[in-house]
Amino acid sequence: MGASQNFDVCVIGAGPGGYVAAIRAAQLGKKTCVIEREYLGGVCLNVGCIPSKAMISASHFLEKMRHDAPEMGIEVKSDIKVNMKKLVGWKQSVSDRMANGVSQLLKGNGVTVIRGEAEFTSPNEISVRSSGDGKGGTTIAAKNFVIATGSRPIEIPGFTIDEKNVLSSTGALALDEVPKKLVVIGGGYIGLEISSYLKKLGSEVIVLEAGGSLLNGVVDRECVQVVERKLKKGGVQVMFNAKAKSYKKSGSQYEVEFESSGKIEKLKCDKILLTVGRRPNSDQTGLKKIGVAMDERGFIKVDAQRRTNLKHIFAIGDIAGQPMLAHKASHEGVLVAEVIGGMNRAYDVKTVPAVVFTDPEIASAGLLESECAGRGYTDLMVSKFPFAANGRAVSLMETDGFVKIIADKKTHVVLGVHMVGPEVSNLISEAALAIEMGARVEDLALTIHPHPTLGEVVMEAAEATLGHAIHVIQKPLSRAESSNGAAATRT
Ligand code: FAD
Ligand code: NAI
């Protein structure tokens, strides 16, 4: 039997939810440990957000070198080659650097890091088994537990992820050879981000999407259309209403069978990428055994303080429900640590901004137009401003896309901002702040934005919503509209 230790706070899982919760709890003077079975930084830093963005940056750079540089007069004399092994090594170094940073931060804040697999043996105690340790390992008792054990890829009948031929995002991110022909099952976040970069690196990519559109229901329809057009222009084939059924070996390739409009069709490829969503890891860690309540999809049920039905056990991040995004996990991490620290906190956000790192990027905060009526907003002001009319975007040769603002016509309060275009991942935070602060469209329009920057598009989209953007031609407002300050509804 191993050692037994006592803590004020025991965090299980060191992803962007767990490691953040542990640091904040330690900052508040709590004796804290974090238990991690695989990698500090979790999915996000090691096999998710960070490595995928490294690959996306590299492929974007390659695309600029190939297509934009010659037009700018930068002559590349020899053919540009991609050394995939070196690229994957560089990607790994980016993840490792971030994970090392997490290790330093935990240490610097006095958090005890325990390596191994945690399992509840009772509501007040867990055992930690390190890999290859059949002896029962360490026992941890704590006043409070934080479950931050994340999620894993969903598998569908007919496809088992082996990370060799049928890949999840983890296998795809580790490929040190570009597959000649790739079939991607699922046109959601992961499928599209990976398709975008593998196509640029040289793969032939076919996306099979079971639904009628990409990123179904999660982002603005018009934003998706811009990305879909560019994907197709770049040579990615997208098939809708195409439900993957099975696959089998066919010579040196694989044959994927899918159902499309009631007919069974077949496609040959070298690799298959399965990205049909992720499921919470709630069937592990002994959670059922101790009676942690879950919903029908396996997400742990939590209240506004992220408490489970067992009052001293909290749950955060992917395991505690949608949206399964790193920044939502980290927000909850700080929140639970402060609740445990005795502070008066609750999860009360107006928006969790979301970004899809396609080409161009899509970013979103607040309500979609389709959601407004359901929240009681029936009279809307909606307008868009294009990146093509922005000097910085033109100088970057990245003019696809727009910023769309949706506001309540009665109060002019900003309800939703949806963007597609260059660097919108960075521009969306201004929109999130506006929505959190209950800003009116005039607040965005009257804030001086530096020139020449992409951020001016947000200001001009606000002006367009009010009917008077300078750098696009808008129909003049009627006298009545301009005198009472009401806005035009124009897109
Ligand atoms: P995780 O990051 O999954 O961490 C959970 C940790 O718990 C893991 O390290 C796991 O090893 C550990 N663990 C599990 N069970 C146990 C146990 N019993 N004992 C000990 N340790 C355990 N989100 C974004 O916001 N932006 C992005 O750009 C983005 N890109 C992504 C790209 C990809 C390819 C993927 C797959 C995901 C991406 N995400 C992105 C989603 C993001 O990674 C997750 O939302 C985020 O990692 C969730 O954080 P978490 O702390 O809840 O869990
Ligand atoms: P997803 O939920 O985004 O998309 C899955 C897609 O697969 C859906 O469009 C669905 O219709 C389709 N599908 C389901 N079954 C199918 C079948 N049999 N055949 C064909 N298509 C099928 O899931 P994904 O891409 O796996 O991502 C999981 C989560 O990870 C995201 O929801 C997001 O929370 C997170 N993530 C976030 C990123 C970001 O913030 N930039 C990047 C990557 C992931």
Image (cartoon, grey):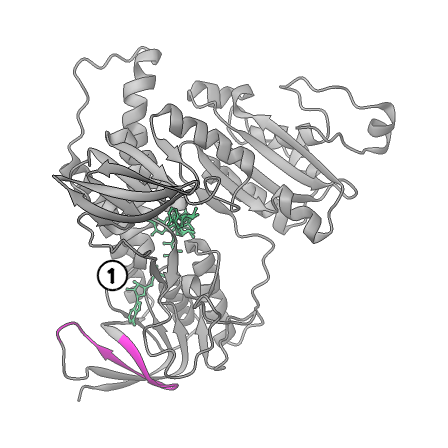
Residue 307 on image: x %, y %: 50, 75
- Check the image and report above or below for 56 versus 20: above
Q: Residue at x 27, y 35 (%)?
A: 198
Mark 1: which amino acid?
A: Tyr
Residue 98 seen by the camera: no
Q: Which residue is pictured at 64% across the width and 35% down the height?
A: 447
Dot 1 lies on which element? loop
Whether residue 91 can be seen here: yes
Which residue carries the number 1 mark? 39
Please tell me which residue lies in front, 195 or 44: 195
Highlighted range, magenta: 118-132
In this rendering, the answer to whether 39 lies above or below 189 is below
The answer to whether the beta carbon of the residue marked 1 is less than 8 Å from any atom of ligand 1 is yes
Residue 75 falls left or right of residue 154: left
Q: Residue at x 40, y 73 (%)?
A: 146
Residue 9 is left or right of residue 183, and the answer is: right
107 and 403: which is toward the camera: 403
Q: How far across and down, in percent of the image, does residue 379 sit?
A: 76, 41
Dot 1, crowdedness within 10 Å: few (<14), some or many (≥20)? some
Query: Is the N terminus in the top left, top right, bottom left or bottom right quadrant?
Result: bottom left
- Specify the quarter for ligand 1: bottom left
Residue at 27% from the left image edge and 37% from the top image edge = 267
Q: Quadrant of residue 25?
A: bottom left
Tell me residue 239's x, y (percent): 39, 36
The single residue placed furthest to the bottom in the displayed view is: 1
Q: Nearer the viewer, residue 215 or 170?
A: 215
Q: Is 23 displayed left or right of 88 in the figure?
A: right
Q: Position of residue 76 (x, y in %)?
A: 22, 15
The quadrant holding residue 120 is bottom left
Q: How many marks?
A: 1
Q: Main secondary structure of the magenta part?
A: strand
Asked if the stretch drawn in magenta spans residue 329, the answer is no
